[in-house]
């Protein structure tokens, strides 16, 4: 198995042309025509590492007509709320990006399903309609199951549950090919420990996997591609260290429009202790890890990395007792993952830059020009918006490495 190729940092302004932002929307395999697109006021795509992604589109809902006779009376029609163009349960694709040097470089952001249409009839002004579509992960909430896995690793459970989802969706979503990244799973399995017992209790597998990913410090998200008319969706399940999306260089006053970081020590601890019970040996055990133990793994330290003077010298400890931990090895893994999760909340921020369709949850950002808040950040959520003011990308991120 070859090493994952390095992704060189990208300066988004170098050799780029951002003058022609564009989007397209496909509903039931038909691209919306110019007349409908001209009614679109804004398109907003939201995604995060923890939630199913979605898109909100606001359209003009009012068609005025020439009034004959009754002066001052409203005359016209509600073109979309009374029509079927944006009715729920329809497939919808959203592409956002640019025409760059005459080339269409829009990216498919969402393969989804319309779930709500919300008309607005204001006291003054024209009526609008907000259409919301959510990722097809929403459709994977097909059947709740009760199932127990014994002596399996997390990625083995992930692969088995996704295989079950694939079999359920072949008939309901024939245009979609769902798969996992086998190389990614192989890397995971090399470091994971077998879990004595994992149980789904009347749960949707896709929701269980999202929750399990958060619990063990993994990220789970979808990567969408296409092959002709067939949509190809890869579900990723991996630690943050494997993220291999483009790394953008954003500098305040140049490519970084705004950024609001937060240096938060309220929830930081010095030690994590995980306690469990071995049902076979009938004995209790615990695993302890300190922040100092993990500095070599890149975990941030508030004193050395952020140059903060600590006045309270008392060590803070978090004790984890609410997890089903049945072996010492599992406790060791959970303790280190919990410490990493806590440390990732030390420096978080929200920012905005010019529209970058490839800046997605899971991307890395090298942020410059912010003093001690400069560094390498992991993007946890993005919002891509196109409207009258152009195309912007807002993001939430956490610092992974001080620079």
Image (cartoon, rainbow, N blue to C red):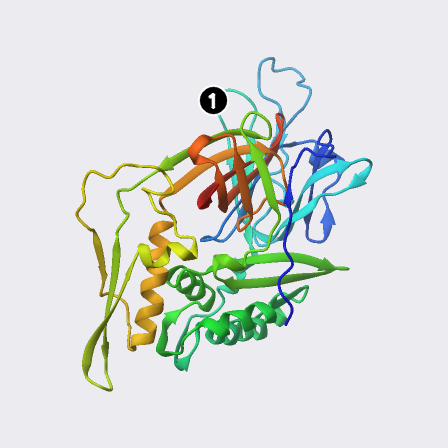
- Farthest top residue? 71
User: Quadrant location of residue 197?
Assistant: bottom left
Q: Position of residue 55 (x, y in %)?
A: 56, 44
Is residue 132 something one can see in this rendering? Answer: no
User: At 29% from the left edge and 42% from the top edge, which residue is drawn?
Assistant: 265
- Farthest right residue? 102
SS type, badge 1: loop
Instruction: Decide if residue 62 is on the left or right side of residue 306.
Output: right
Q: Nearer the viewer, residue 196 or 93?
A: 196
Is residue 337 something one can see in this rendering? Answer: yes
Instruction: Decide if residue 159 is on the left or right side of residue 317.
Output: right
User: Quadrant location of residue 102?
Assistant: top right
Q: Is residue 137 above or below residue 264?
A: below
Q: Is residue 72 above or below residue 19?
A: above
Count of numbered circles in the view: 1
Q: Position of residue 287 (x, y in %)?
A: 26, 68
Q: Nearer the viewer, residue 87 or 5?
A: 5
Q: Nearer the viewer, residue 288 or 344?
A: 288
Q: Position of residue 262 (x, y in %)?
A: 37, 36
Q: Which residue is mark 1?
A: 123
User: At 49% from the left edge and 34% from the top edge, which residue is drawn?
Assistant: 351
Q: Residues within 10 Å of mark 1 (few under 14, many from 20)?
A: few
User: At 36% from the left edge and 75% from the top edge, which residue is drawn?
Assistant: 199
- Farthest bottom residue? 280
Instruction: Decide if residue 51 is on the left or right side of residue 19.
Output: left
User: Quadrant location of residue 144?
Assistant: bottom left
Quadrant (top left, top right, bottom left, bottom right) of the N terminus: bottom right
Q: Is residue 364 above or below residue 121?
A: below
Q: Position of residue 188 (x, y in %)?
A: 50, 70
Q: Nearer the viewer, residue 222 or 93?
A: 222
């Amino acid at each position: 198995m070859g090493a994952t190729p390095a992704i060189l940092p990208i300066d988004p302004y170098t050799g780029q042309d951002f003058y022609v932002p564009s989007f397209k929307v496909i509903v039931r395999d038909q691209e919306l025509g110019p007349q409908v697109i001209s009614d679109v006021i804004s398109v907003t795509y939201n995604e995060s590492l923890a939630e199913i992604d979605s898109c909100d589109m606001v359209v003009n809902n009012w068609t005025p007509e020439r009034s004959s006779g009754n002066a001052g009376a409203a005359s016209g029609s509600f073109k979309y709320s009374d029509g079927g163009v944006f009715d729920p349960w329809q497939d919808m694709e959203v592409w956002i990006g640019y025409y760059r040097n005459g080339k269409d470089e829009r990216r498919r952001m969402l393969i989804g399903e319309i779930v709500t249409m919300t008309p607005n009839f204001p006291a003054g002004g024209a009526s609008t309609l907000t259409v919301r579509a959510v990722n097809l992960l929403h459709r994977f909430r097909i059947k709740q199951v009760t199932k127990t896995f014994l002596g399996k690793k997390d990625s083995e459970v992930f692969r088995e549950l996704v295989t079950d989802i694939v079999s359920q969706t072949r008939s309901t979503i024939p245009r979609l090919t769902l798969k996992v990244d086998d190389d990614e799973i192989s890397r995971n399995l090399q470091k994971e420990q077998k879990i004595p017992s994992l149980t789904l209790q009347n749960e949707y597998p896709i929701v269980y996997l999202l929750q399990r990913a958060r619990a063990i410090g993994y990220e789970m998200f979808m990567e969408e591609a296409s092959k002709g008319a067939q949509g190809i969706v890869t579900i990723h399940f991996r630690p943050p260290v494997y993220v291999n999306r483009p790394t953008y260089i954003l500098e305040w006053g140049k490519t970084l429009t705004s950024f609001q970081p937060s240096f938060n020590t309220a929830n930081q601890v010095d030690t994590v202790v995980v306690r469990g019970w071995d049902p076979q040996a009938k004995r209790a055990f615990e695993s302890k890890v300190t922040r100092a133990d993990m500095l070599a793994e890149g975990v941030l330290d508030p004193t050395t990395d952020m140059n903060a003077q600590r006045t309270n010298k008392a060590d803070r400890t978090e004790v984890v007792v609410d997890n089903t931990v049945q072996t010492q090895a599992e406790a060791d893994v959970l303790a280190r993952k919990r410490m990493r999760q806590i440390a990732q909340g030390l420096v978080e921020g929200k920012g905005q830059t010019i529209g970058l369709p490839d800046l997605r949850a899971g991307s890395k950002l090298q942020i410059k020009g912010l003093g001690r808040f400069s560094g390498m950040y992991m993007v946890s959520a993005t919002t891509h918006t196109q409207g009258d003011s152009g195309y912007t990308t807002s993001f939430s991120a956490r610092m992974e490495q001080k620079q």
